[in-house]
Amino acid sequence: MTATTTAPVAAPPVPTPHGPNARLRAWATRAPLLPALVFMIVVTQLPFVATVVISFFDWNALYPDARRFTGFDNYHQVLTDADLRHSVWTTVLLTGTVVLVSLLLGLALALLLDRRFRGRGVVRTLLIAPFLVVPVAAALLWKHVLYNPEYGLLNGLLHYVGGPQPDWISDTPLLAVEASLVWQWTPFMMLILLAGLQSRDQQQIEAARVDGASDWQIFRHLTLPHLRRYLELGALLGSIYIVQNFDAVFTITSGGLGTANLPYTVYQSFYQAHENGLASAAGVLVVIGSIVIATFALRVVSSLFREEVSRA
């Protein structure tokens, strides 16, 4: 007696509908999204187009009748003027320092919170709290509660131990701004890296421990390569937001003592010098830089999604 096997019959392909009815159904499914699309274009794209147009004009708000088309002169001035060039360098230095230090501290905190201990939920909530504080309120907190040379907490502690009592904002202005931003953005990095730690393959880690791998070897050869995408994502997202930061610079130093970044320079050119064209050119450069960083961030996010789908 021989058994016979029959190959499964493939189902016929489902025909794709064509014609006016299919197009009508497709538009019917997209119609609810049209108001949101129109609102987004009106609120975001039209003002940006207007900003680009104004950036090609020599336009001082105090002399509106004297405006004239100057082409790329405003962009040339932004990139060649010493003060504006210094604000660009300050923006790069501020963003790089805050992102790097926040990532390192966020990684350390994420590694601690990845362990089970009593009260972990309360500790996690307390560590997230700085990120939930309004940026202006956080900057005011650092300026008056911590940095004040007369009644600030830092000088109070130094006075208690007999140490020097510096004027933090005057002596180290850029470091004062960076410290407040690191305090605020470390929880953001911690959350991203903690999500990456909790997505590790625990069986692989247990197998490494059985083979005699130490904690450092597991971190170096398993955990750190796994967190590479999450580190990139945190760095890119943090850079997008910090490169546009205005609150801390405006509140703590008012852009003085060499802390004026590019967003503050845009504010200064627009509201104090009334140079609409020059401020628009600087703003366009900030947007272009943010778009470049956001493009890399989206690629990292899409690669993370592809990796998660491949594991499923």
Image (cartoon, helix red, strand yellow):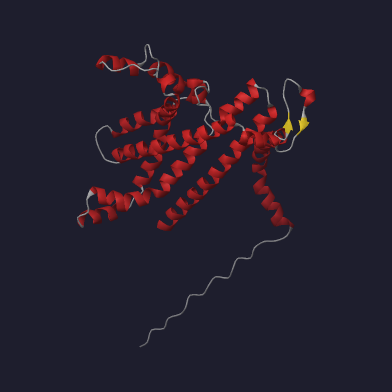
**Percent position of residue 292, x then y:** 56, 44
Q: Quadrant of the C terminus?
A: bottom left
Q: Is residue 85 above or below residue 62?
A: below
Q: Residue at x 52, y 30 (%)?
A: 245
Q: Looking at the image, which is closer to me, 125 or 231?
A: 231
Q: Is residue 14 left or right of residue 116?
A: right
Most distant residue in the top direction: 150
Q: Residue furthest right?
A: 65
**Would you identify the image quadrant in which residue 149 lies?**
top left
At 61% across and 32% down in the image, what residue appears? 81
Work out whether residue 103 can be spotted: yes
Residue 216 placement (x, y as % from top left): 25, 48
- Image quarter where the N terminus lies is bottom left
Q: Is residue 27 left or right of residue 262?
A: right
From this viewpoint, is residue 39 visible? no
Residue at (24% x, 56% y) in the render: 207
Label tally: 0
Q: Is residue 184 above or below residue 34?
A: above
Closest to the observer, 212 or 72: 72
Residue 13 sits in which quadrant?
bottom right
Q: Nearer the viewer, residue 301 or 15?
A: 301
Nearest to the observer: residue 82 or residue 282: 82
Residue 291, percent from left and from top? 58, 42
